[in-house]
Amino acid sequence: MANDIRNIAIIAHVDHGKTTLVDGMLKQSGIFRQNQVVQERVMDSNDLEKERGITILAKNTSVRYQNIKINIVDTPGHSDFGGEVERVLKMVDGVLLLVDAAEGPMPQTRFVLRKALELNLVPVVVINKIDRPDARISEVVDEVYELFFELGANDEQLDFPVVYTIARQGLATNDPDVPGENLQPLFETILEHFPAPQGETEAPLQMLVNNTEYDSYIGRVAVGRIVQGSISSGQQVAVINYEGAVKNHRIGRVYTFEGLERVEVPRAQCGEIVVVSGLEDIKIGETIADKDNPIPLPAITVDEPTLEMTFMVNDSPFAGQEGDHITSRKVRARLYKEAEKNVSLRVQDTDSPEIFKVAGRGELHLSILIETMRREGYELQVSKPEVIFRRDEANCWSLWNYCWLIYLRTRWVRSWKVWVTVRVK
């Protein structure tokens, strides 16, 4: 067990202040120089994130408090990027559920909390923006309790602490009537309430790949948490894919997160979130395991896409005037490359080599992909989005029973009203 590590994710509805809170935690942990100029929402490093003011990709960082390393995963708040949240929740042991003091729990709050509770993660509720003129703090806390009850939280999850914050000012307090001075109450709650990672350092290696990236210097890298054992540079490991096939690889370099930087280390132990290189064909959801005792971990599962669009090669009279990548081969390669790291995206070939079916979680999800490809120099045509319909055979009978009970209840209420009216007359 790594007692000097805490792994947490910050989850919330869009614009409830997750990234701003991470900014405050980074500044007060002392990772920046006193005279260093730090931009607002420093975790939103993507150009589209800066322009739109939202978090699109989940990102890792870390802070240190009282010699304890806190690995933090900043997650998107928009429902279209819910797959990013589902992908990273297996890296952490607990979640900070951020709720706006005026708006209260919103649809994405319900979604991300449901996913966290299903994984039996430890929750801490943070009521943010308590300085708003229209803040209704006590009512929002009651709404959060109701949401936990509705989602079937167990007794331990219902016994969550509540911290009140003004993330923009870097203030936190355990009592909304007592003004906060800094984020120390939040740090203390994290250390006290969130458990240290479980696992044995001497056990065979197990690491689930939660993300893959490309580094221009070291090539393709895998990001994940070491569940068991340890990993070191040059180590021979086994990679287990979705089908259970095992392939041997050699680890290149091992990095850990320190603030906003990746720091190379010779060895990392269980509980740590690491970045490893040397695995060129690694994919999200695969397991990095001990070479002599390869044991797979449960694969990452996310909800299915809801919208579908047709991507086509640009065959208009103006084709080739703006982009550099206009052939179907390049467009296809780019789409399948995106599908490798975007777990909510589905790409499918059609009978025509110039037409591809692309399914995602929403219009914003697909529009971000289109805009990213456009900025990279790709030219393409797209159709209007279409809703994907599915028939859930397992729940059809339950839905029919529910509708029938509603009908009978309505008839009973009407009959009861008629009976009461007759008796009164």
Image (cartoon, rainbow, N blue to C red):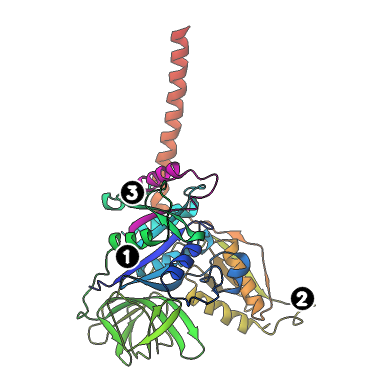
At which x and y percent is residue 134?
Answer: 54, 44
Q: Residue at x 19, y 81 (%)?
A: 202
Q: Is residue 28 above or below residue 215?
A: above
Depth check, front residue: 237 or 415: 237
Region rendered in magenta: 121-149
Residue extending furthest toward the right: 317
Depth check, front residue: 225 or 26: 26
Q: Earlier in the sequence, mark 2 or mark 3?
A: 3
At which x and y percent is residue 328?
Answer: 64, 81
At which x and y percent is residue 309?
Answer: 61, 66
Q: Is residue 84 above or below residue 296?
A: above
Q: Which amino acid, by three-letter code, is at mark 3? A: Gly
Q: Earlier in the sequence, mark 1 or mark 3?
A: 1
User: What residue does disc 3 label?
Assistant: 152
Distance between the alpha carbons at the discs numbered 2 and 1? 51 Å
- State left or right for residue 249 relative to residue 214: left
The answer to whether the residue labelled 1 contacts the one labelled 3, judged by CB atoms less than 8 Å apart, is: no
User: What residue does disc 2 label?
Assistant: 316
Q: Which amino acid, by three-letter code, is at mark 2? A: Ser
Distance between the alpha carbons at the discs numbered 2 and 3? 53 Å
Q: Which amino acid, by three-letter code, is at mark 1? A: Asp
Q: Residue at x 43, y 19 (%)?
A: 416
The image quadrant of residue 365 is bottom right
- State left or right for residue 112 relative to residue 118: right
- State left or right for residue 328 relative to residue 71: right
User: Is residue 80 highlighted in magenta?
Assistant: no
At which x and y percent is residue 304?
Answer: 47, 62
User: What residue does disc 1 label?
Assistant: 93
